[in-house]
Image: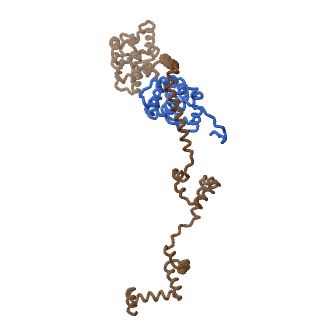
Amino acid sequence: MPIEVKLEQVQKLLEQMGIRNVEPTAATAAQVKRMCVETEKRRAAEGYVRKVEEVMSFAGASPYVVFAFETQQGVICIPDSNFVVSTNGIYYVHKMDCRGDASLKCAQVADKVVDLLGIRSLISSTTFLAIHPSEQELCELGILPPTACRKKEKEKEEKMEGEEEKEEEEEKKTTVVTQEELEPLESVALKRLTEELMRAQRRTAEEQKPKDPKAALKELGLGWLADLGEADVAALRSVTEDKTLLNVLKDAEKRNAVRKFIESGFAAPQPAAPPNIAKWPQKDVELFAKLAEGSRSIHELVVKYLEAEFGCDVSIIYDIMQDLIKQAGGCEQLQKMRRRLT
Amino acid sequence: MRAVAKNAPQVDMSIIAQLEEAVEEGKELGPCAWFYLLMVMGRKKNLGGPVRKRLTAKALGQILLWVVERNGKGNVVSLKSTYIRNAIILYAKEHKCYPYDSAQTSPQVERIIKAHMRAIMAVVRRWVRIAPPCDPTNPTVCQRHLMVRVDWLRQFLSGLSGLA
């Protein structure tokens, strides 16, 4: 596989991860060795070196791509500096600043790079942890192998179990308390509890006492019902005792029908009669009632009254009266004329 | 509701039976009643019988509900024995229940709570078992640390009506 293809793939990977400012720089094997911290001590073993050579021969120039992650502890390289086997080769170093908050992103890049270079089996958790020291986060992201995470989790669980057992032991231990020590406080608590109970029972008994029905209605916001007359109460009682109407009212349609019936069944309130009529002589009241009964207006009532009073055609009297007032030049003139005549 | 014949002979009920009846009937007990109940849990003879788990749950529920409503911060709460003990003491202090009506601290109360802690924690563990996991990605941790979501706890304790 030509080197250019691998470099392109590396650029693509970086782009995919949203990293744009990493440009490869060329370095010799000696420079790489000087730059990188050795994290994988075991790589010195002969077997591992052979394995790296196999990877190199299989993937062509790919191991020549080096990622250098700059951390607080030094520069961690992937592949590790132990992988540098060709002293004559050119190494394309991609340097990334992984100090501070960037460390997690670097660990993610390292994870992808390991896959890209096909050297997963050669990288241990130590390298990833050197880039980003939080084991929990690396486990959560699936960067560390599950075996390593399970081991840690198990240890944690065992520790927690131990804590819980300890706590339970403490609970058990404290159960043994001499009765004498607890006597006074428990006695008072028992006394107070009994008092509370009695108070609650008294309160309930008071609540159950019959209340003034009118006051109870007012408390419930039904004061208008409390002001009903005897007849209305009797009607209400018969309705509620029968319960038929209450059941009917549960149905919306029937309830509306009942409401309409009530509204139509009661005539509009009648205006009260003039109060002084009651003081009139009985004869006049009867006459007024008789005249008013068939009258459609006050004019008609007056005409009828004049008919009754003078016993002749009302329209003539009406016309005569109007002519007289007209000719005299108003009521006042007419009165003056009448005064002069008498 | 229990039907009682008008002429039935009056039987002296034990305190615990009266208490259970009062709770079942929804009678309003004073706030300190729940604290006193947790204090006298071990006095079977004086109470006239053992305090049943559901009554303990009711008392503890009332206390914890008050504490949770009052505190109101955080999403998750760990119902470990220390938290429960502190909650009971805080409740008693705030409601001025004996002996906190006259004293700021009471080692005796703390010892009684510790003495009853096993019974109390049995109730708490049962709640934690039925609670939804506080963290769906790691339910075992929630169970182990007796962690429950505060909103769930509030809802659950509010629903602990009567002795159901």
Residue furthest to the bottom: A341
Residue A65 appearing in the image = no
Q: Is residue A240 above or below residue B142?
A: below
- The image shows residue B106 at horizontal and vertical percentages of 44, 25
- Point out residue B8 in the picture as x, y percentages from the top left corner: 66, 39
Question: Which one is nearer the viewer's eye here, B154 or A147?
Answer: B154
Q: Considering the image in quadrants, where does the C terminus of chain B appear?
A: top right
Query: Foreground: A156 or B25?
Result: B25
* Residue at image location 51% in from the left, 78% down from the top: A280
Camera-nearest residue between B140 and A26: B140
By what rule are the colours in the image chosen?
A: by chain
Q: Which residue is drawn at 59% across and 64% down?
A: A265
Task: Name the residue located 47 percent from the left edge and 87 percent from the top edge.
Answer: A319
Residue B137 drawn above or below residue A86 = below
Across and down, in percent, residue B137 comes to: 50, 26
Residue A57 left/right relative to A289: left
- Chain in blue? B
Q: Image quadrant for the N terminus of chain B?
A: top right
The brown one among the chains is A
User: In the drawing, does residue A323 fall left or right of residue A254?
Assistant: left
Q: How many labels does the image show?
A: 0
Looking at the image, is A10 positioned above or below residue B151? Answer: above
Residue B69 percent across, percent down from the top left = 46, 35
Residue toward you, A84 or B43: B43
Residue A284 visible: yes
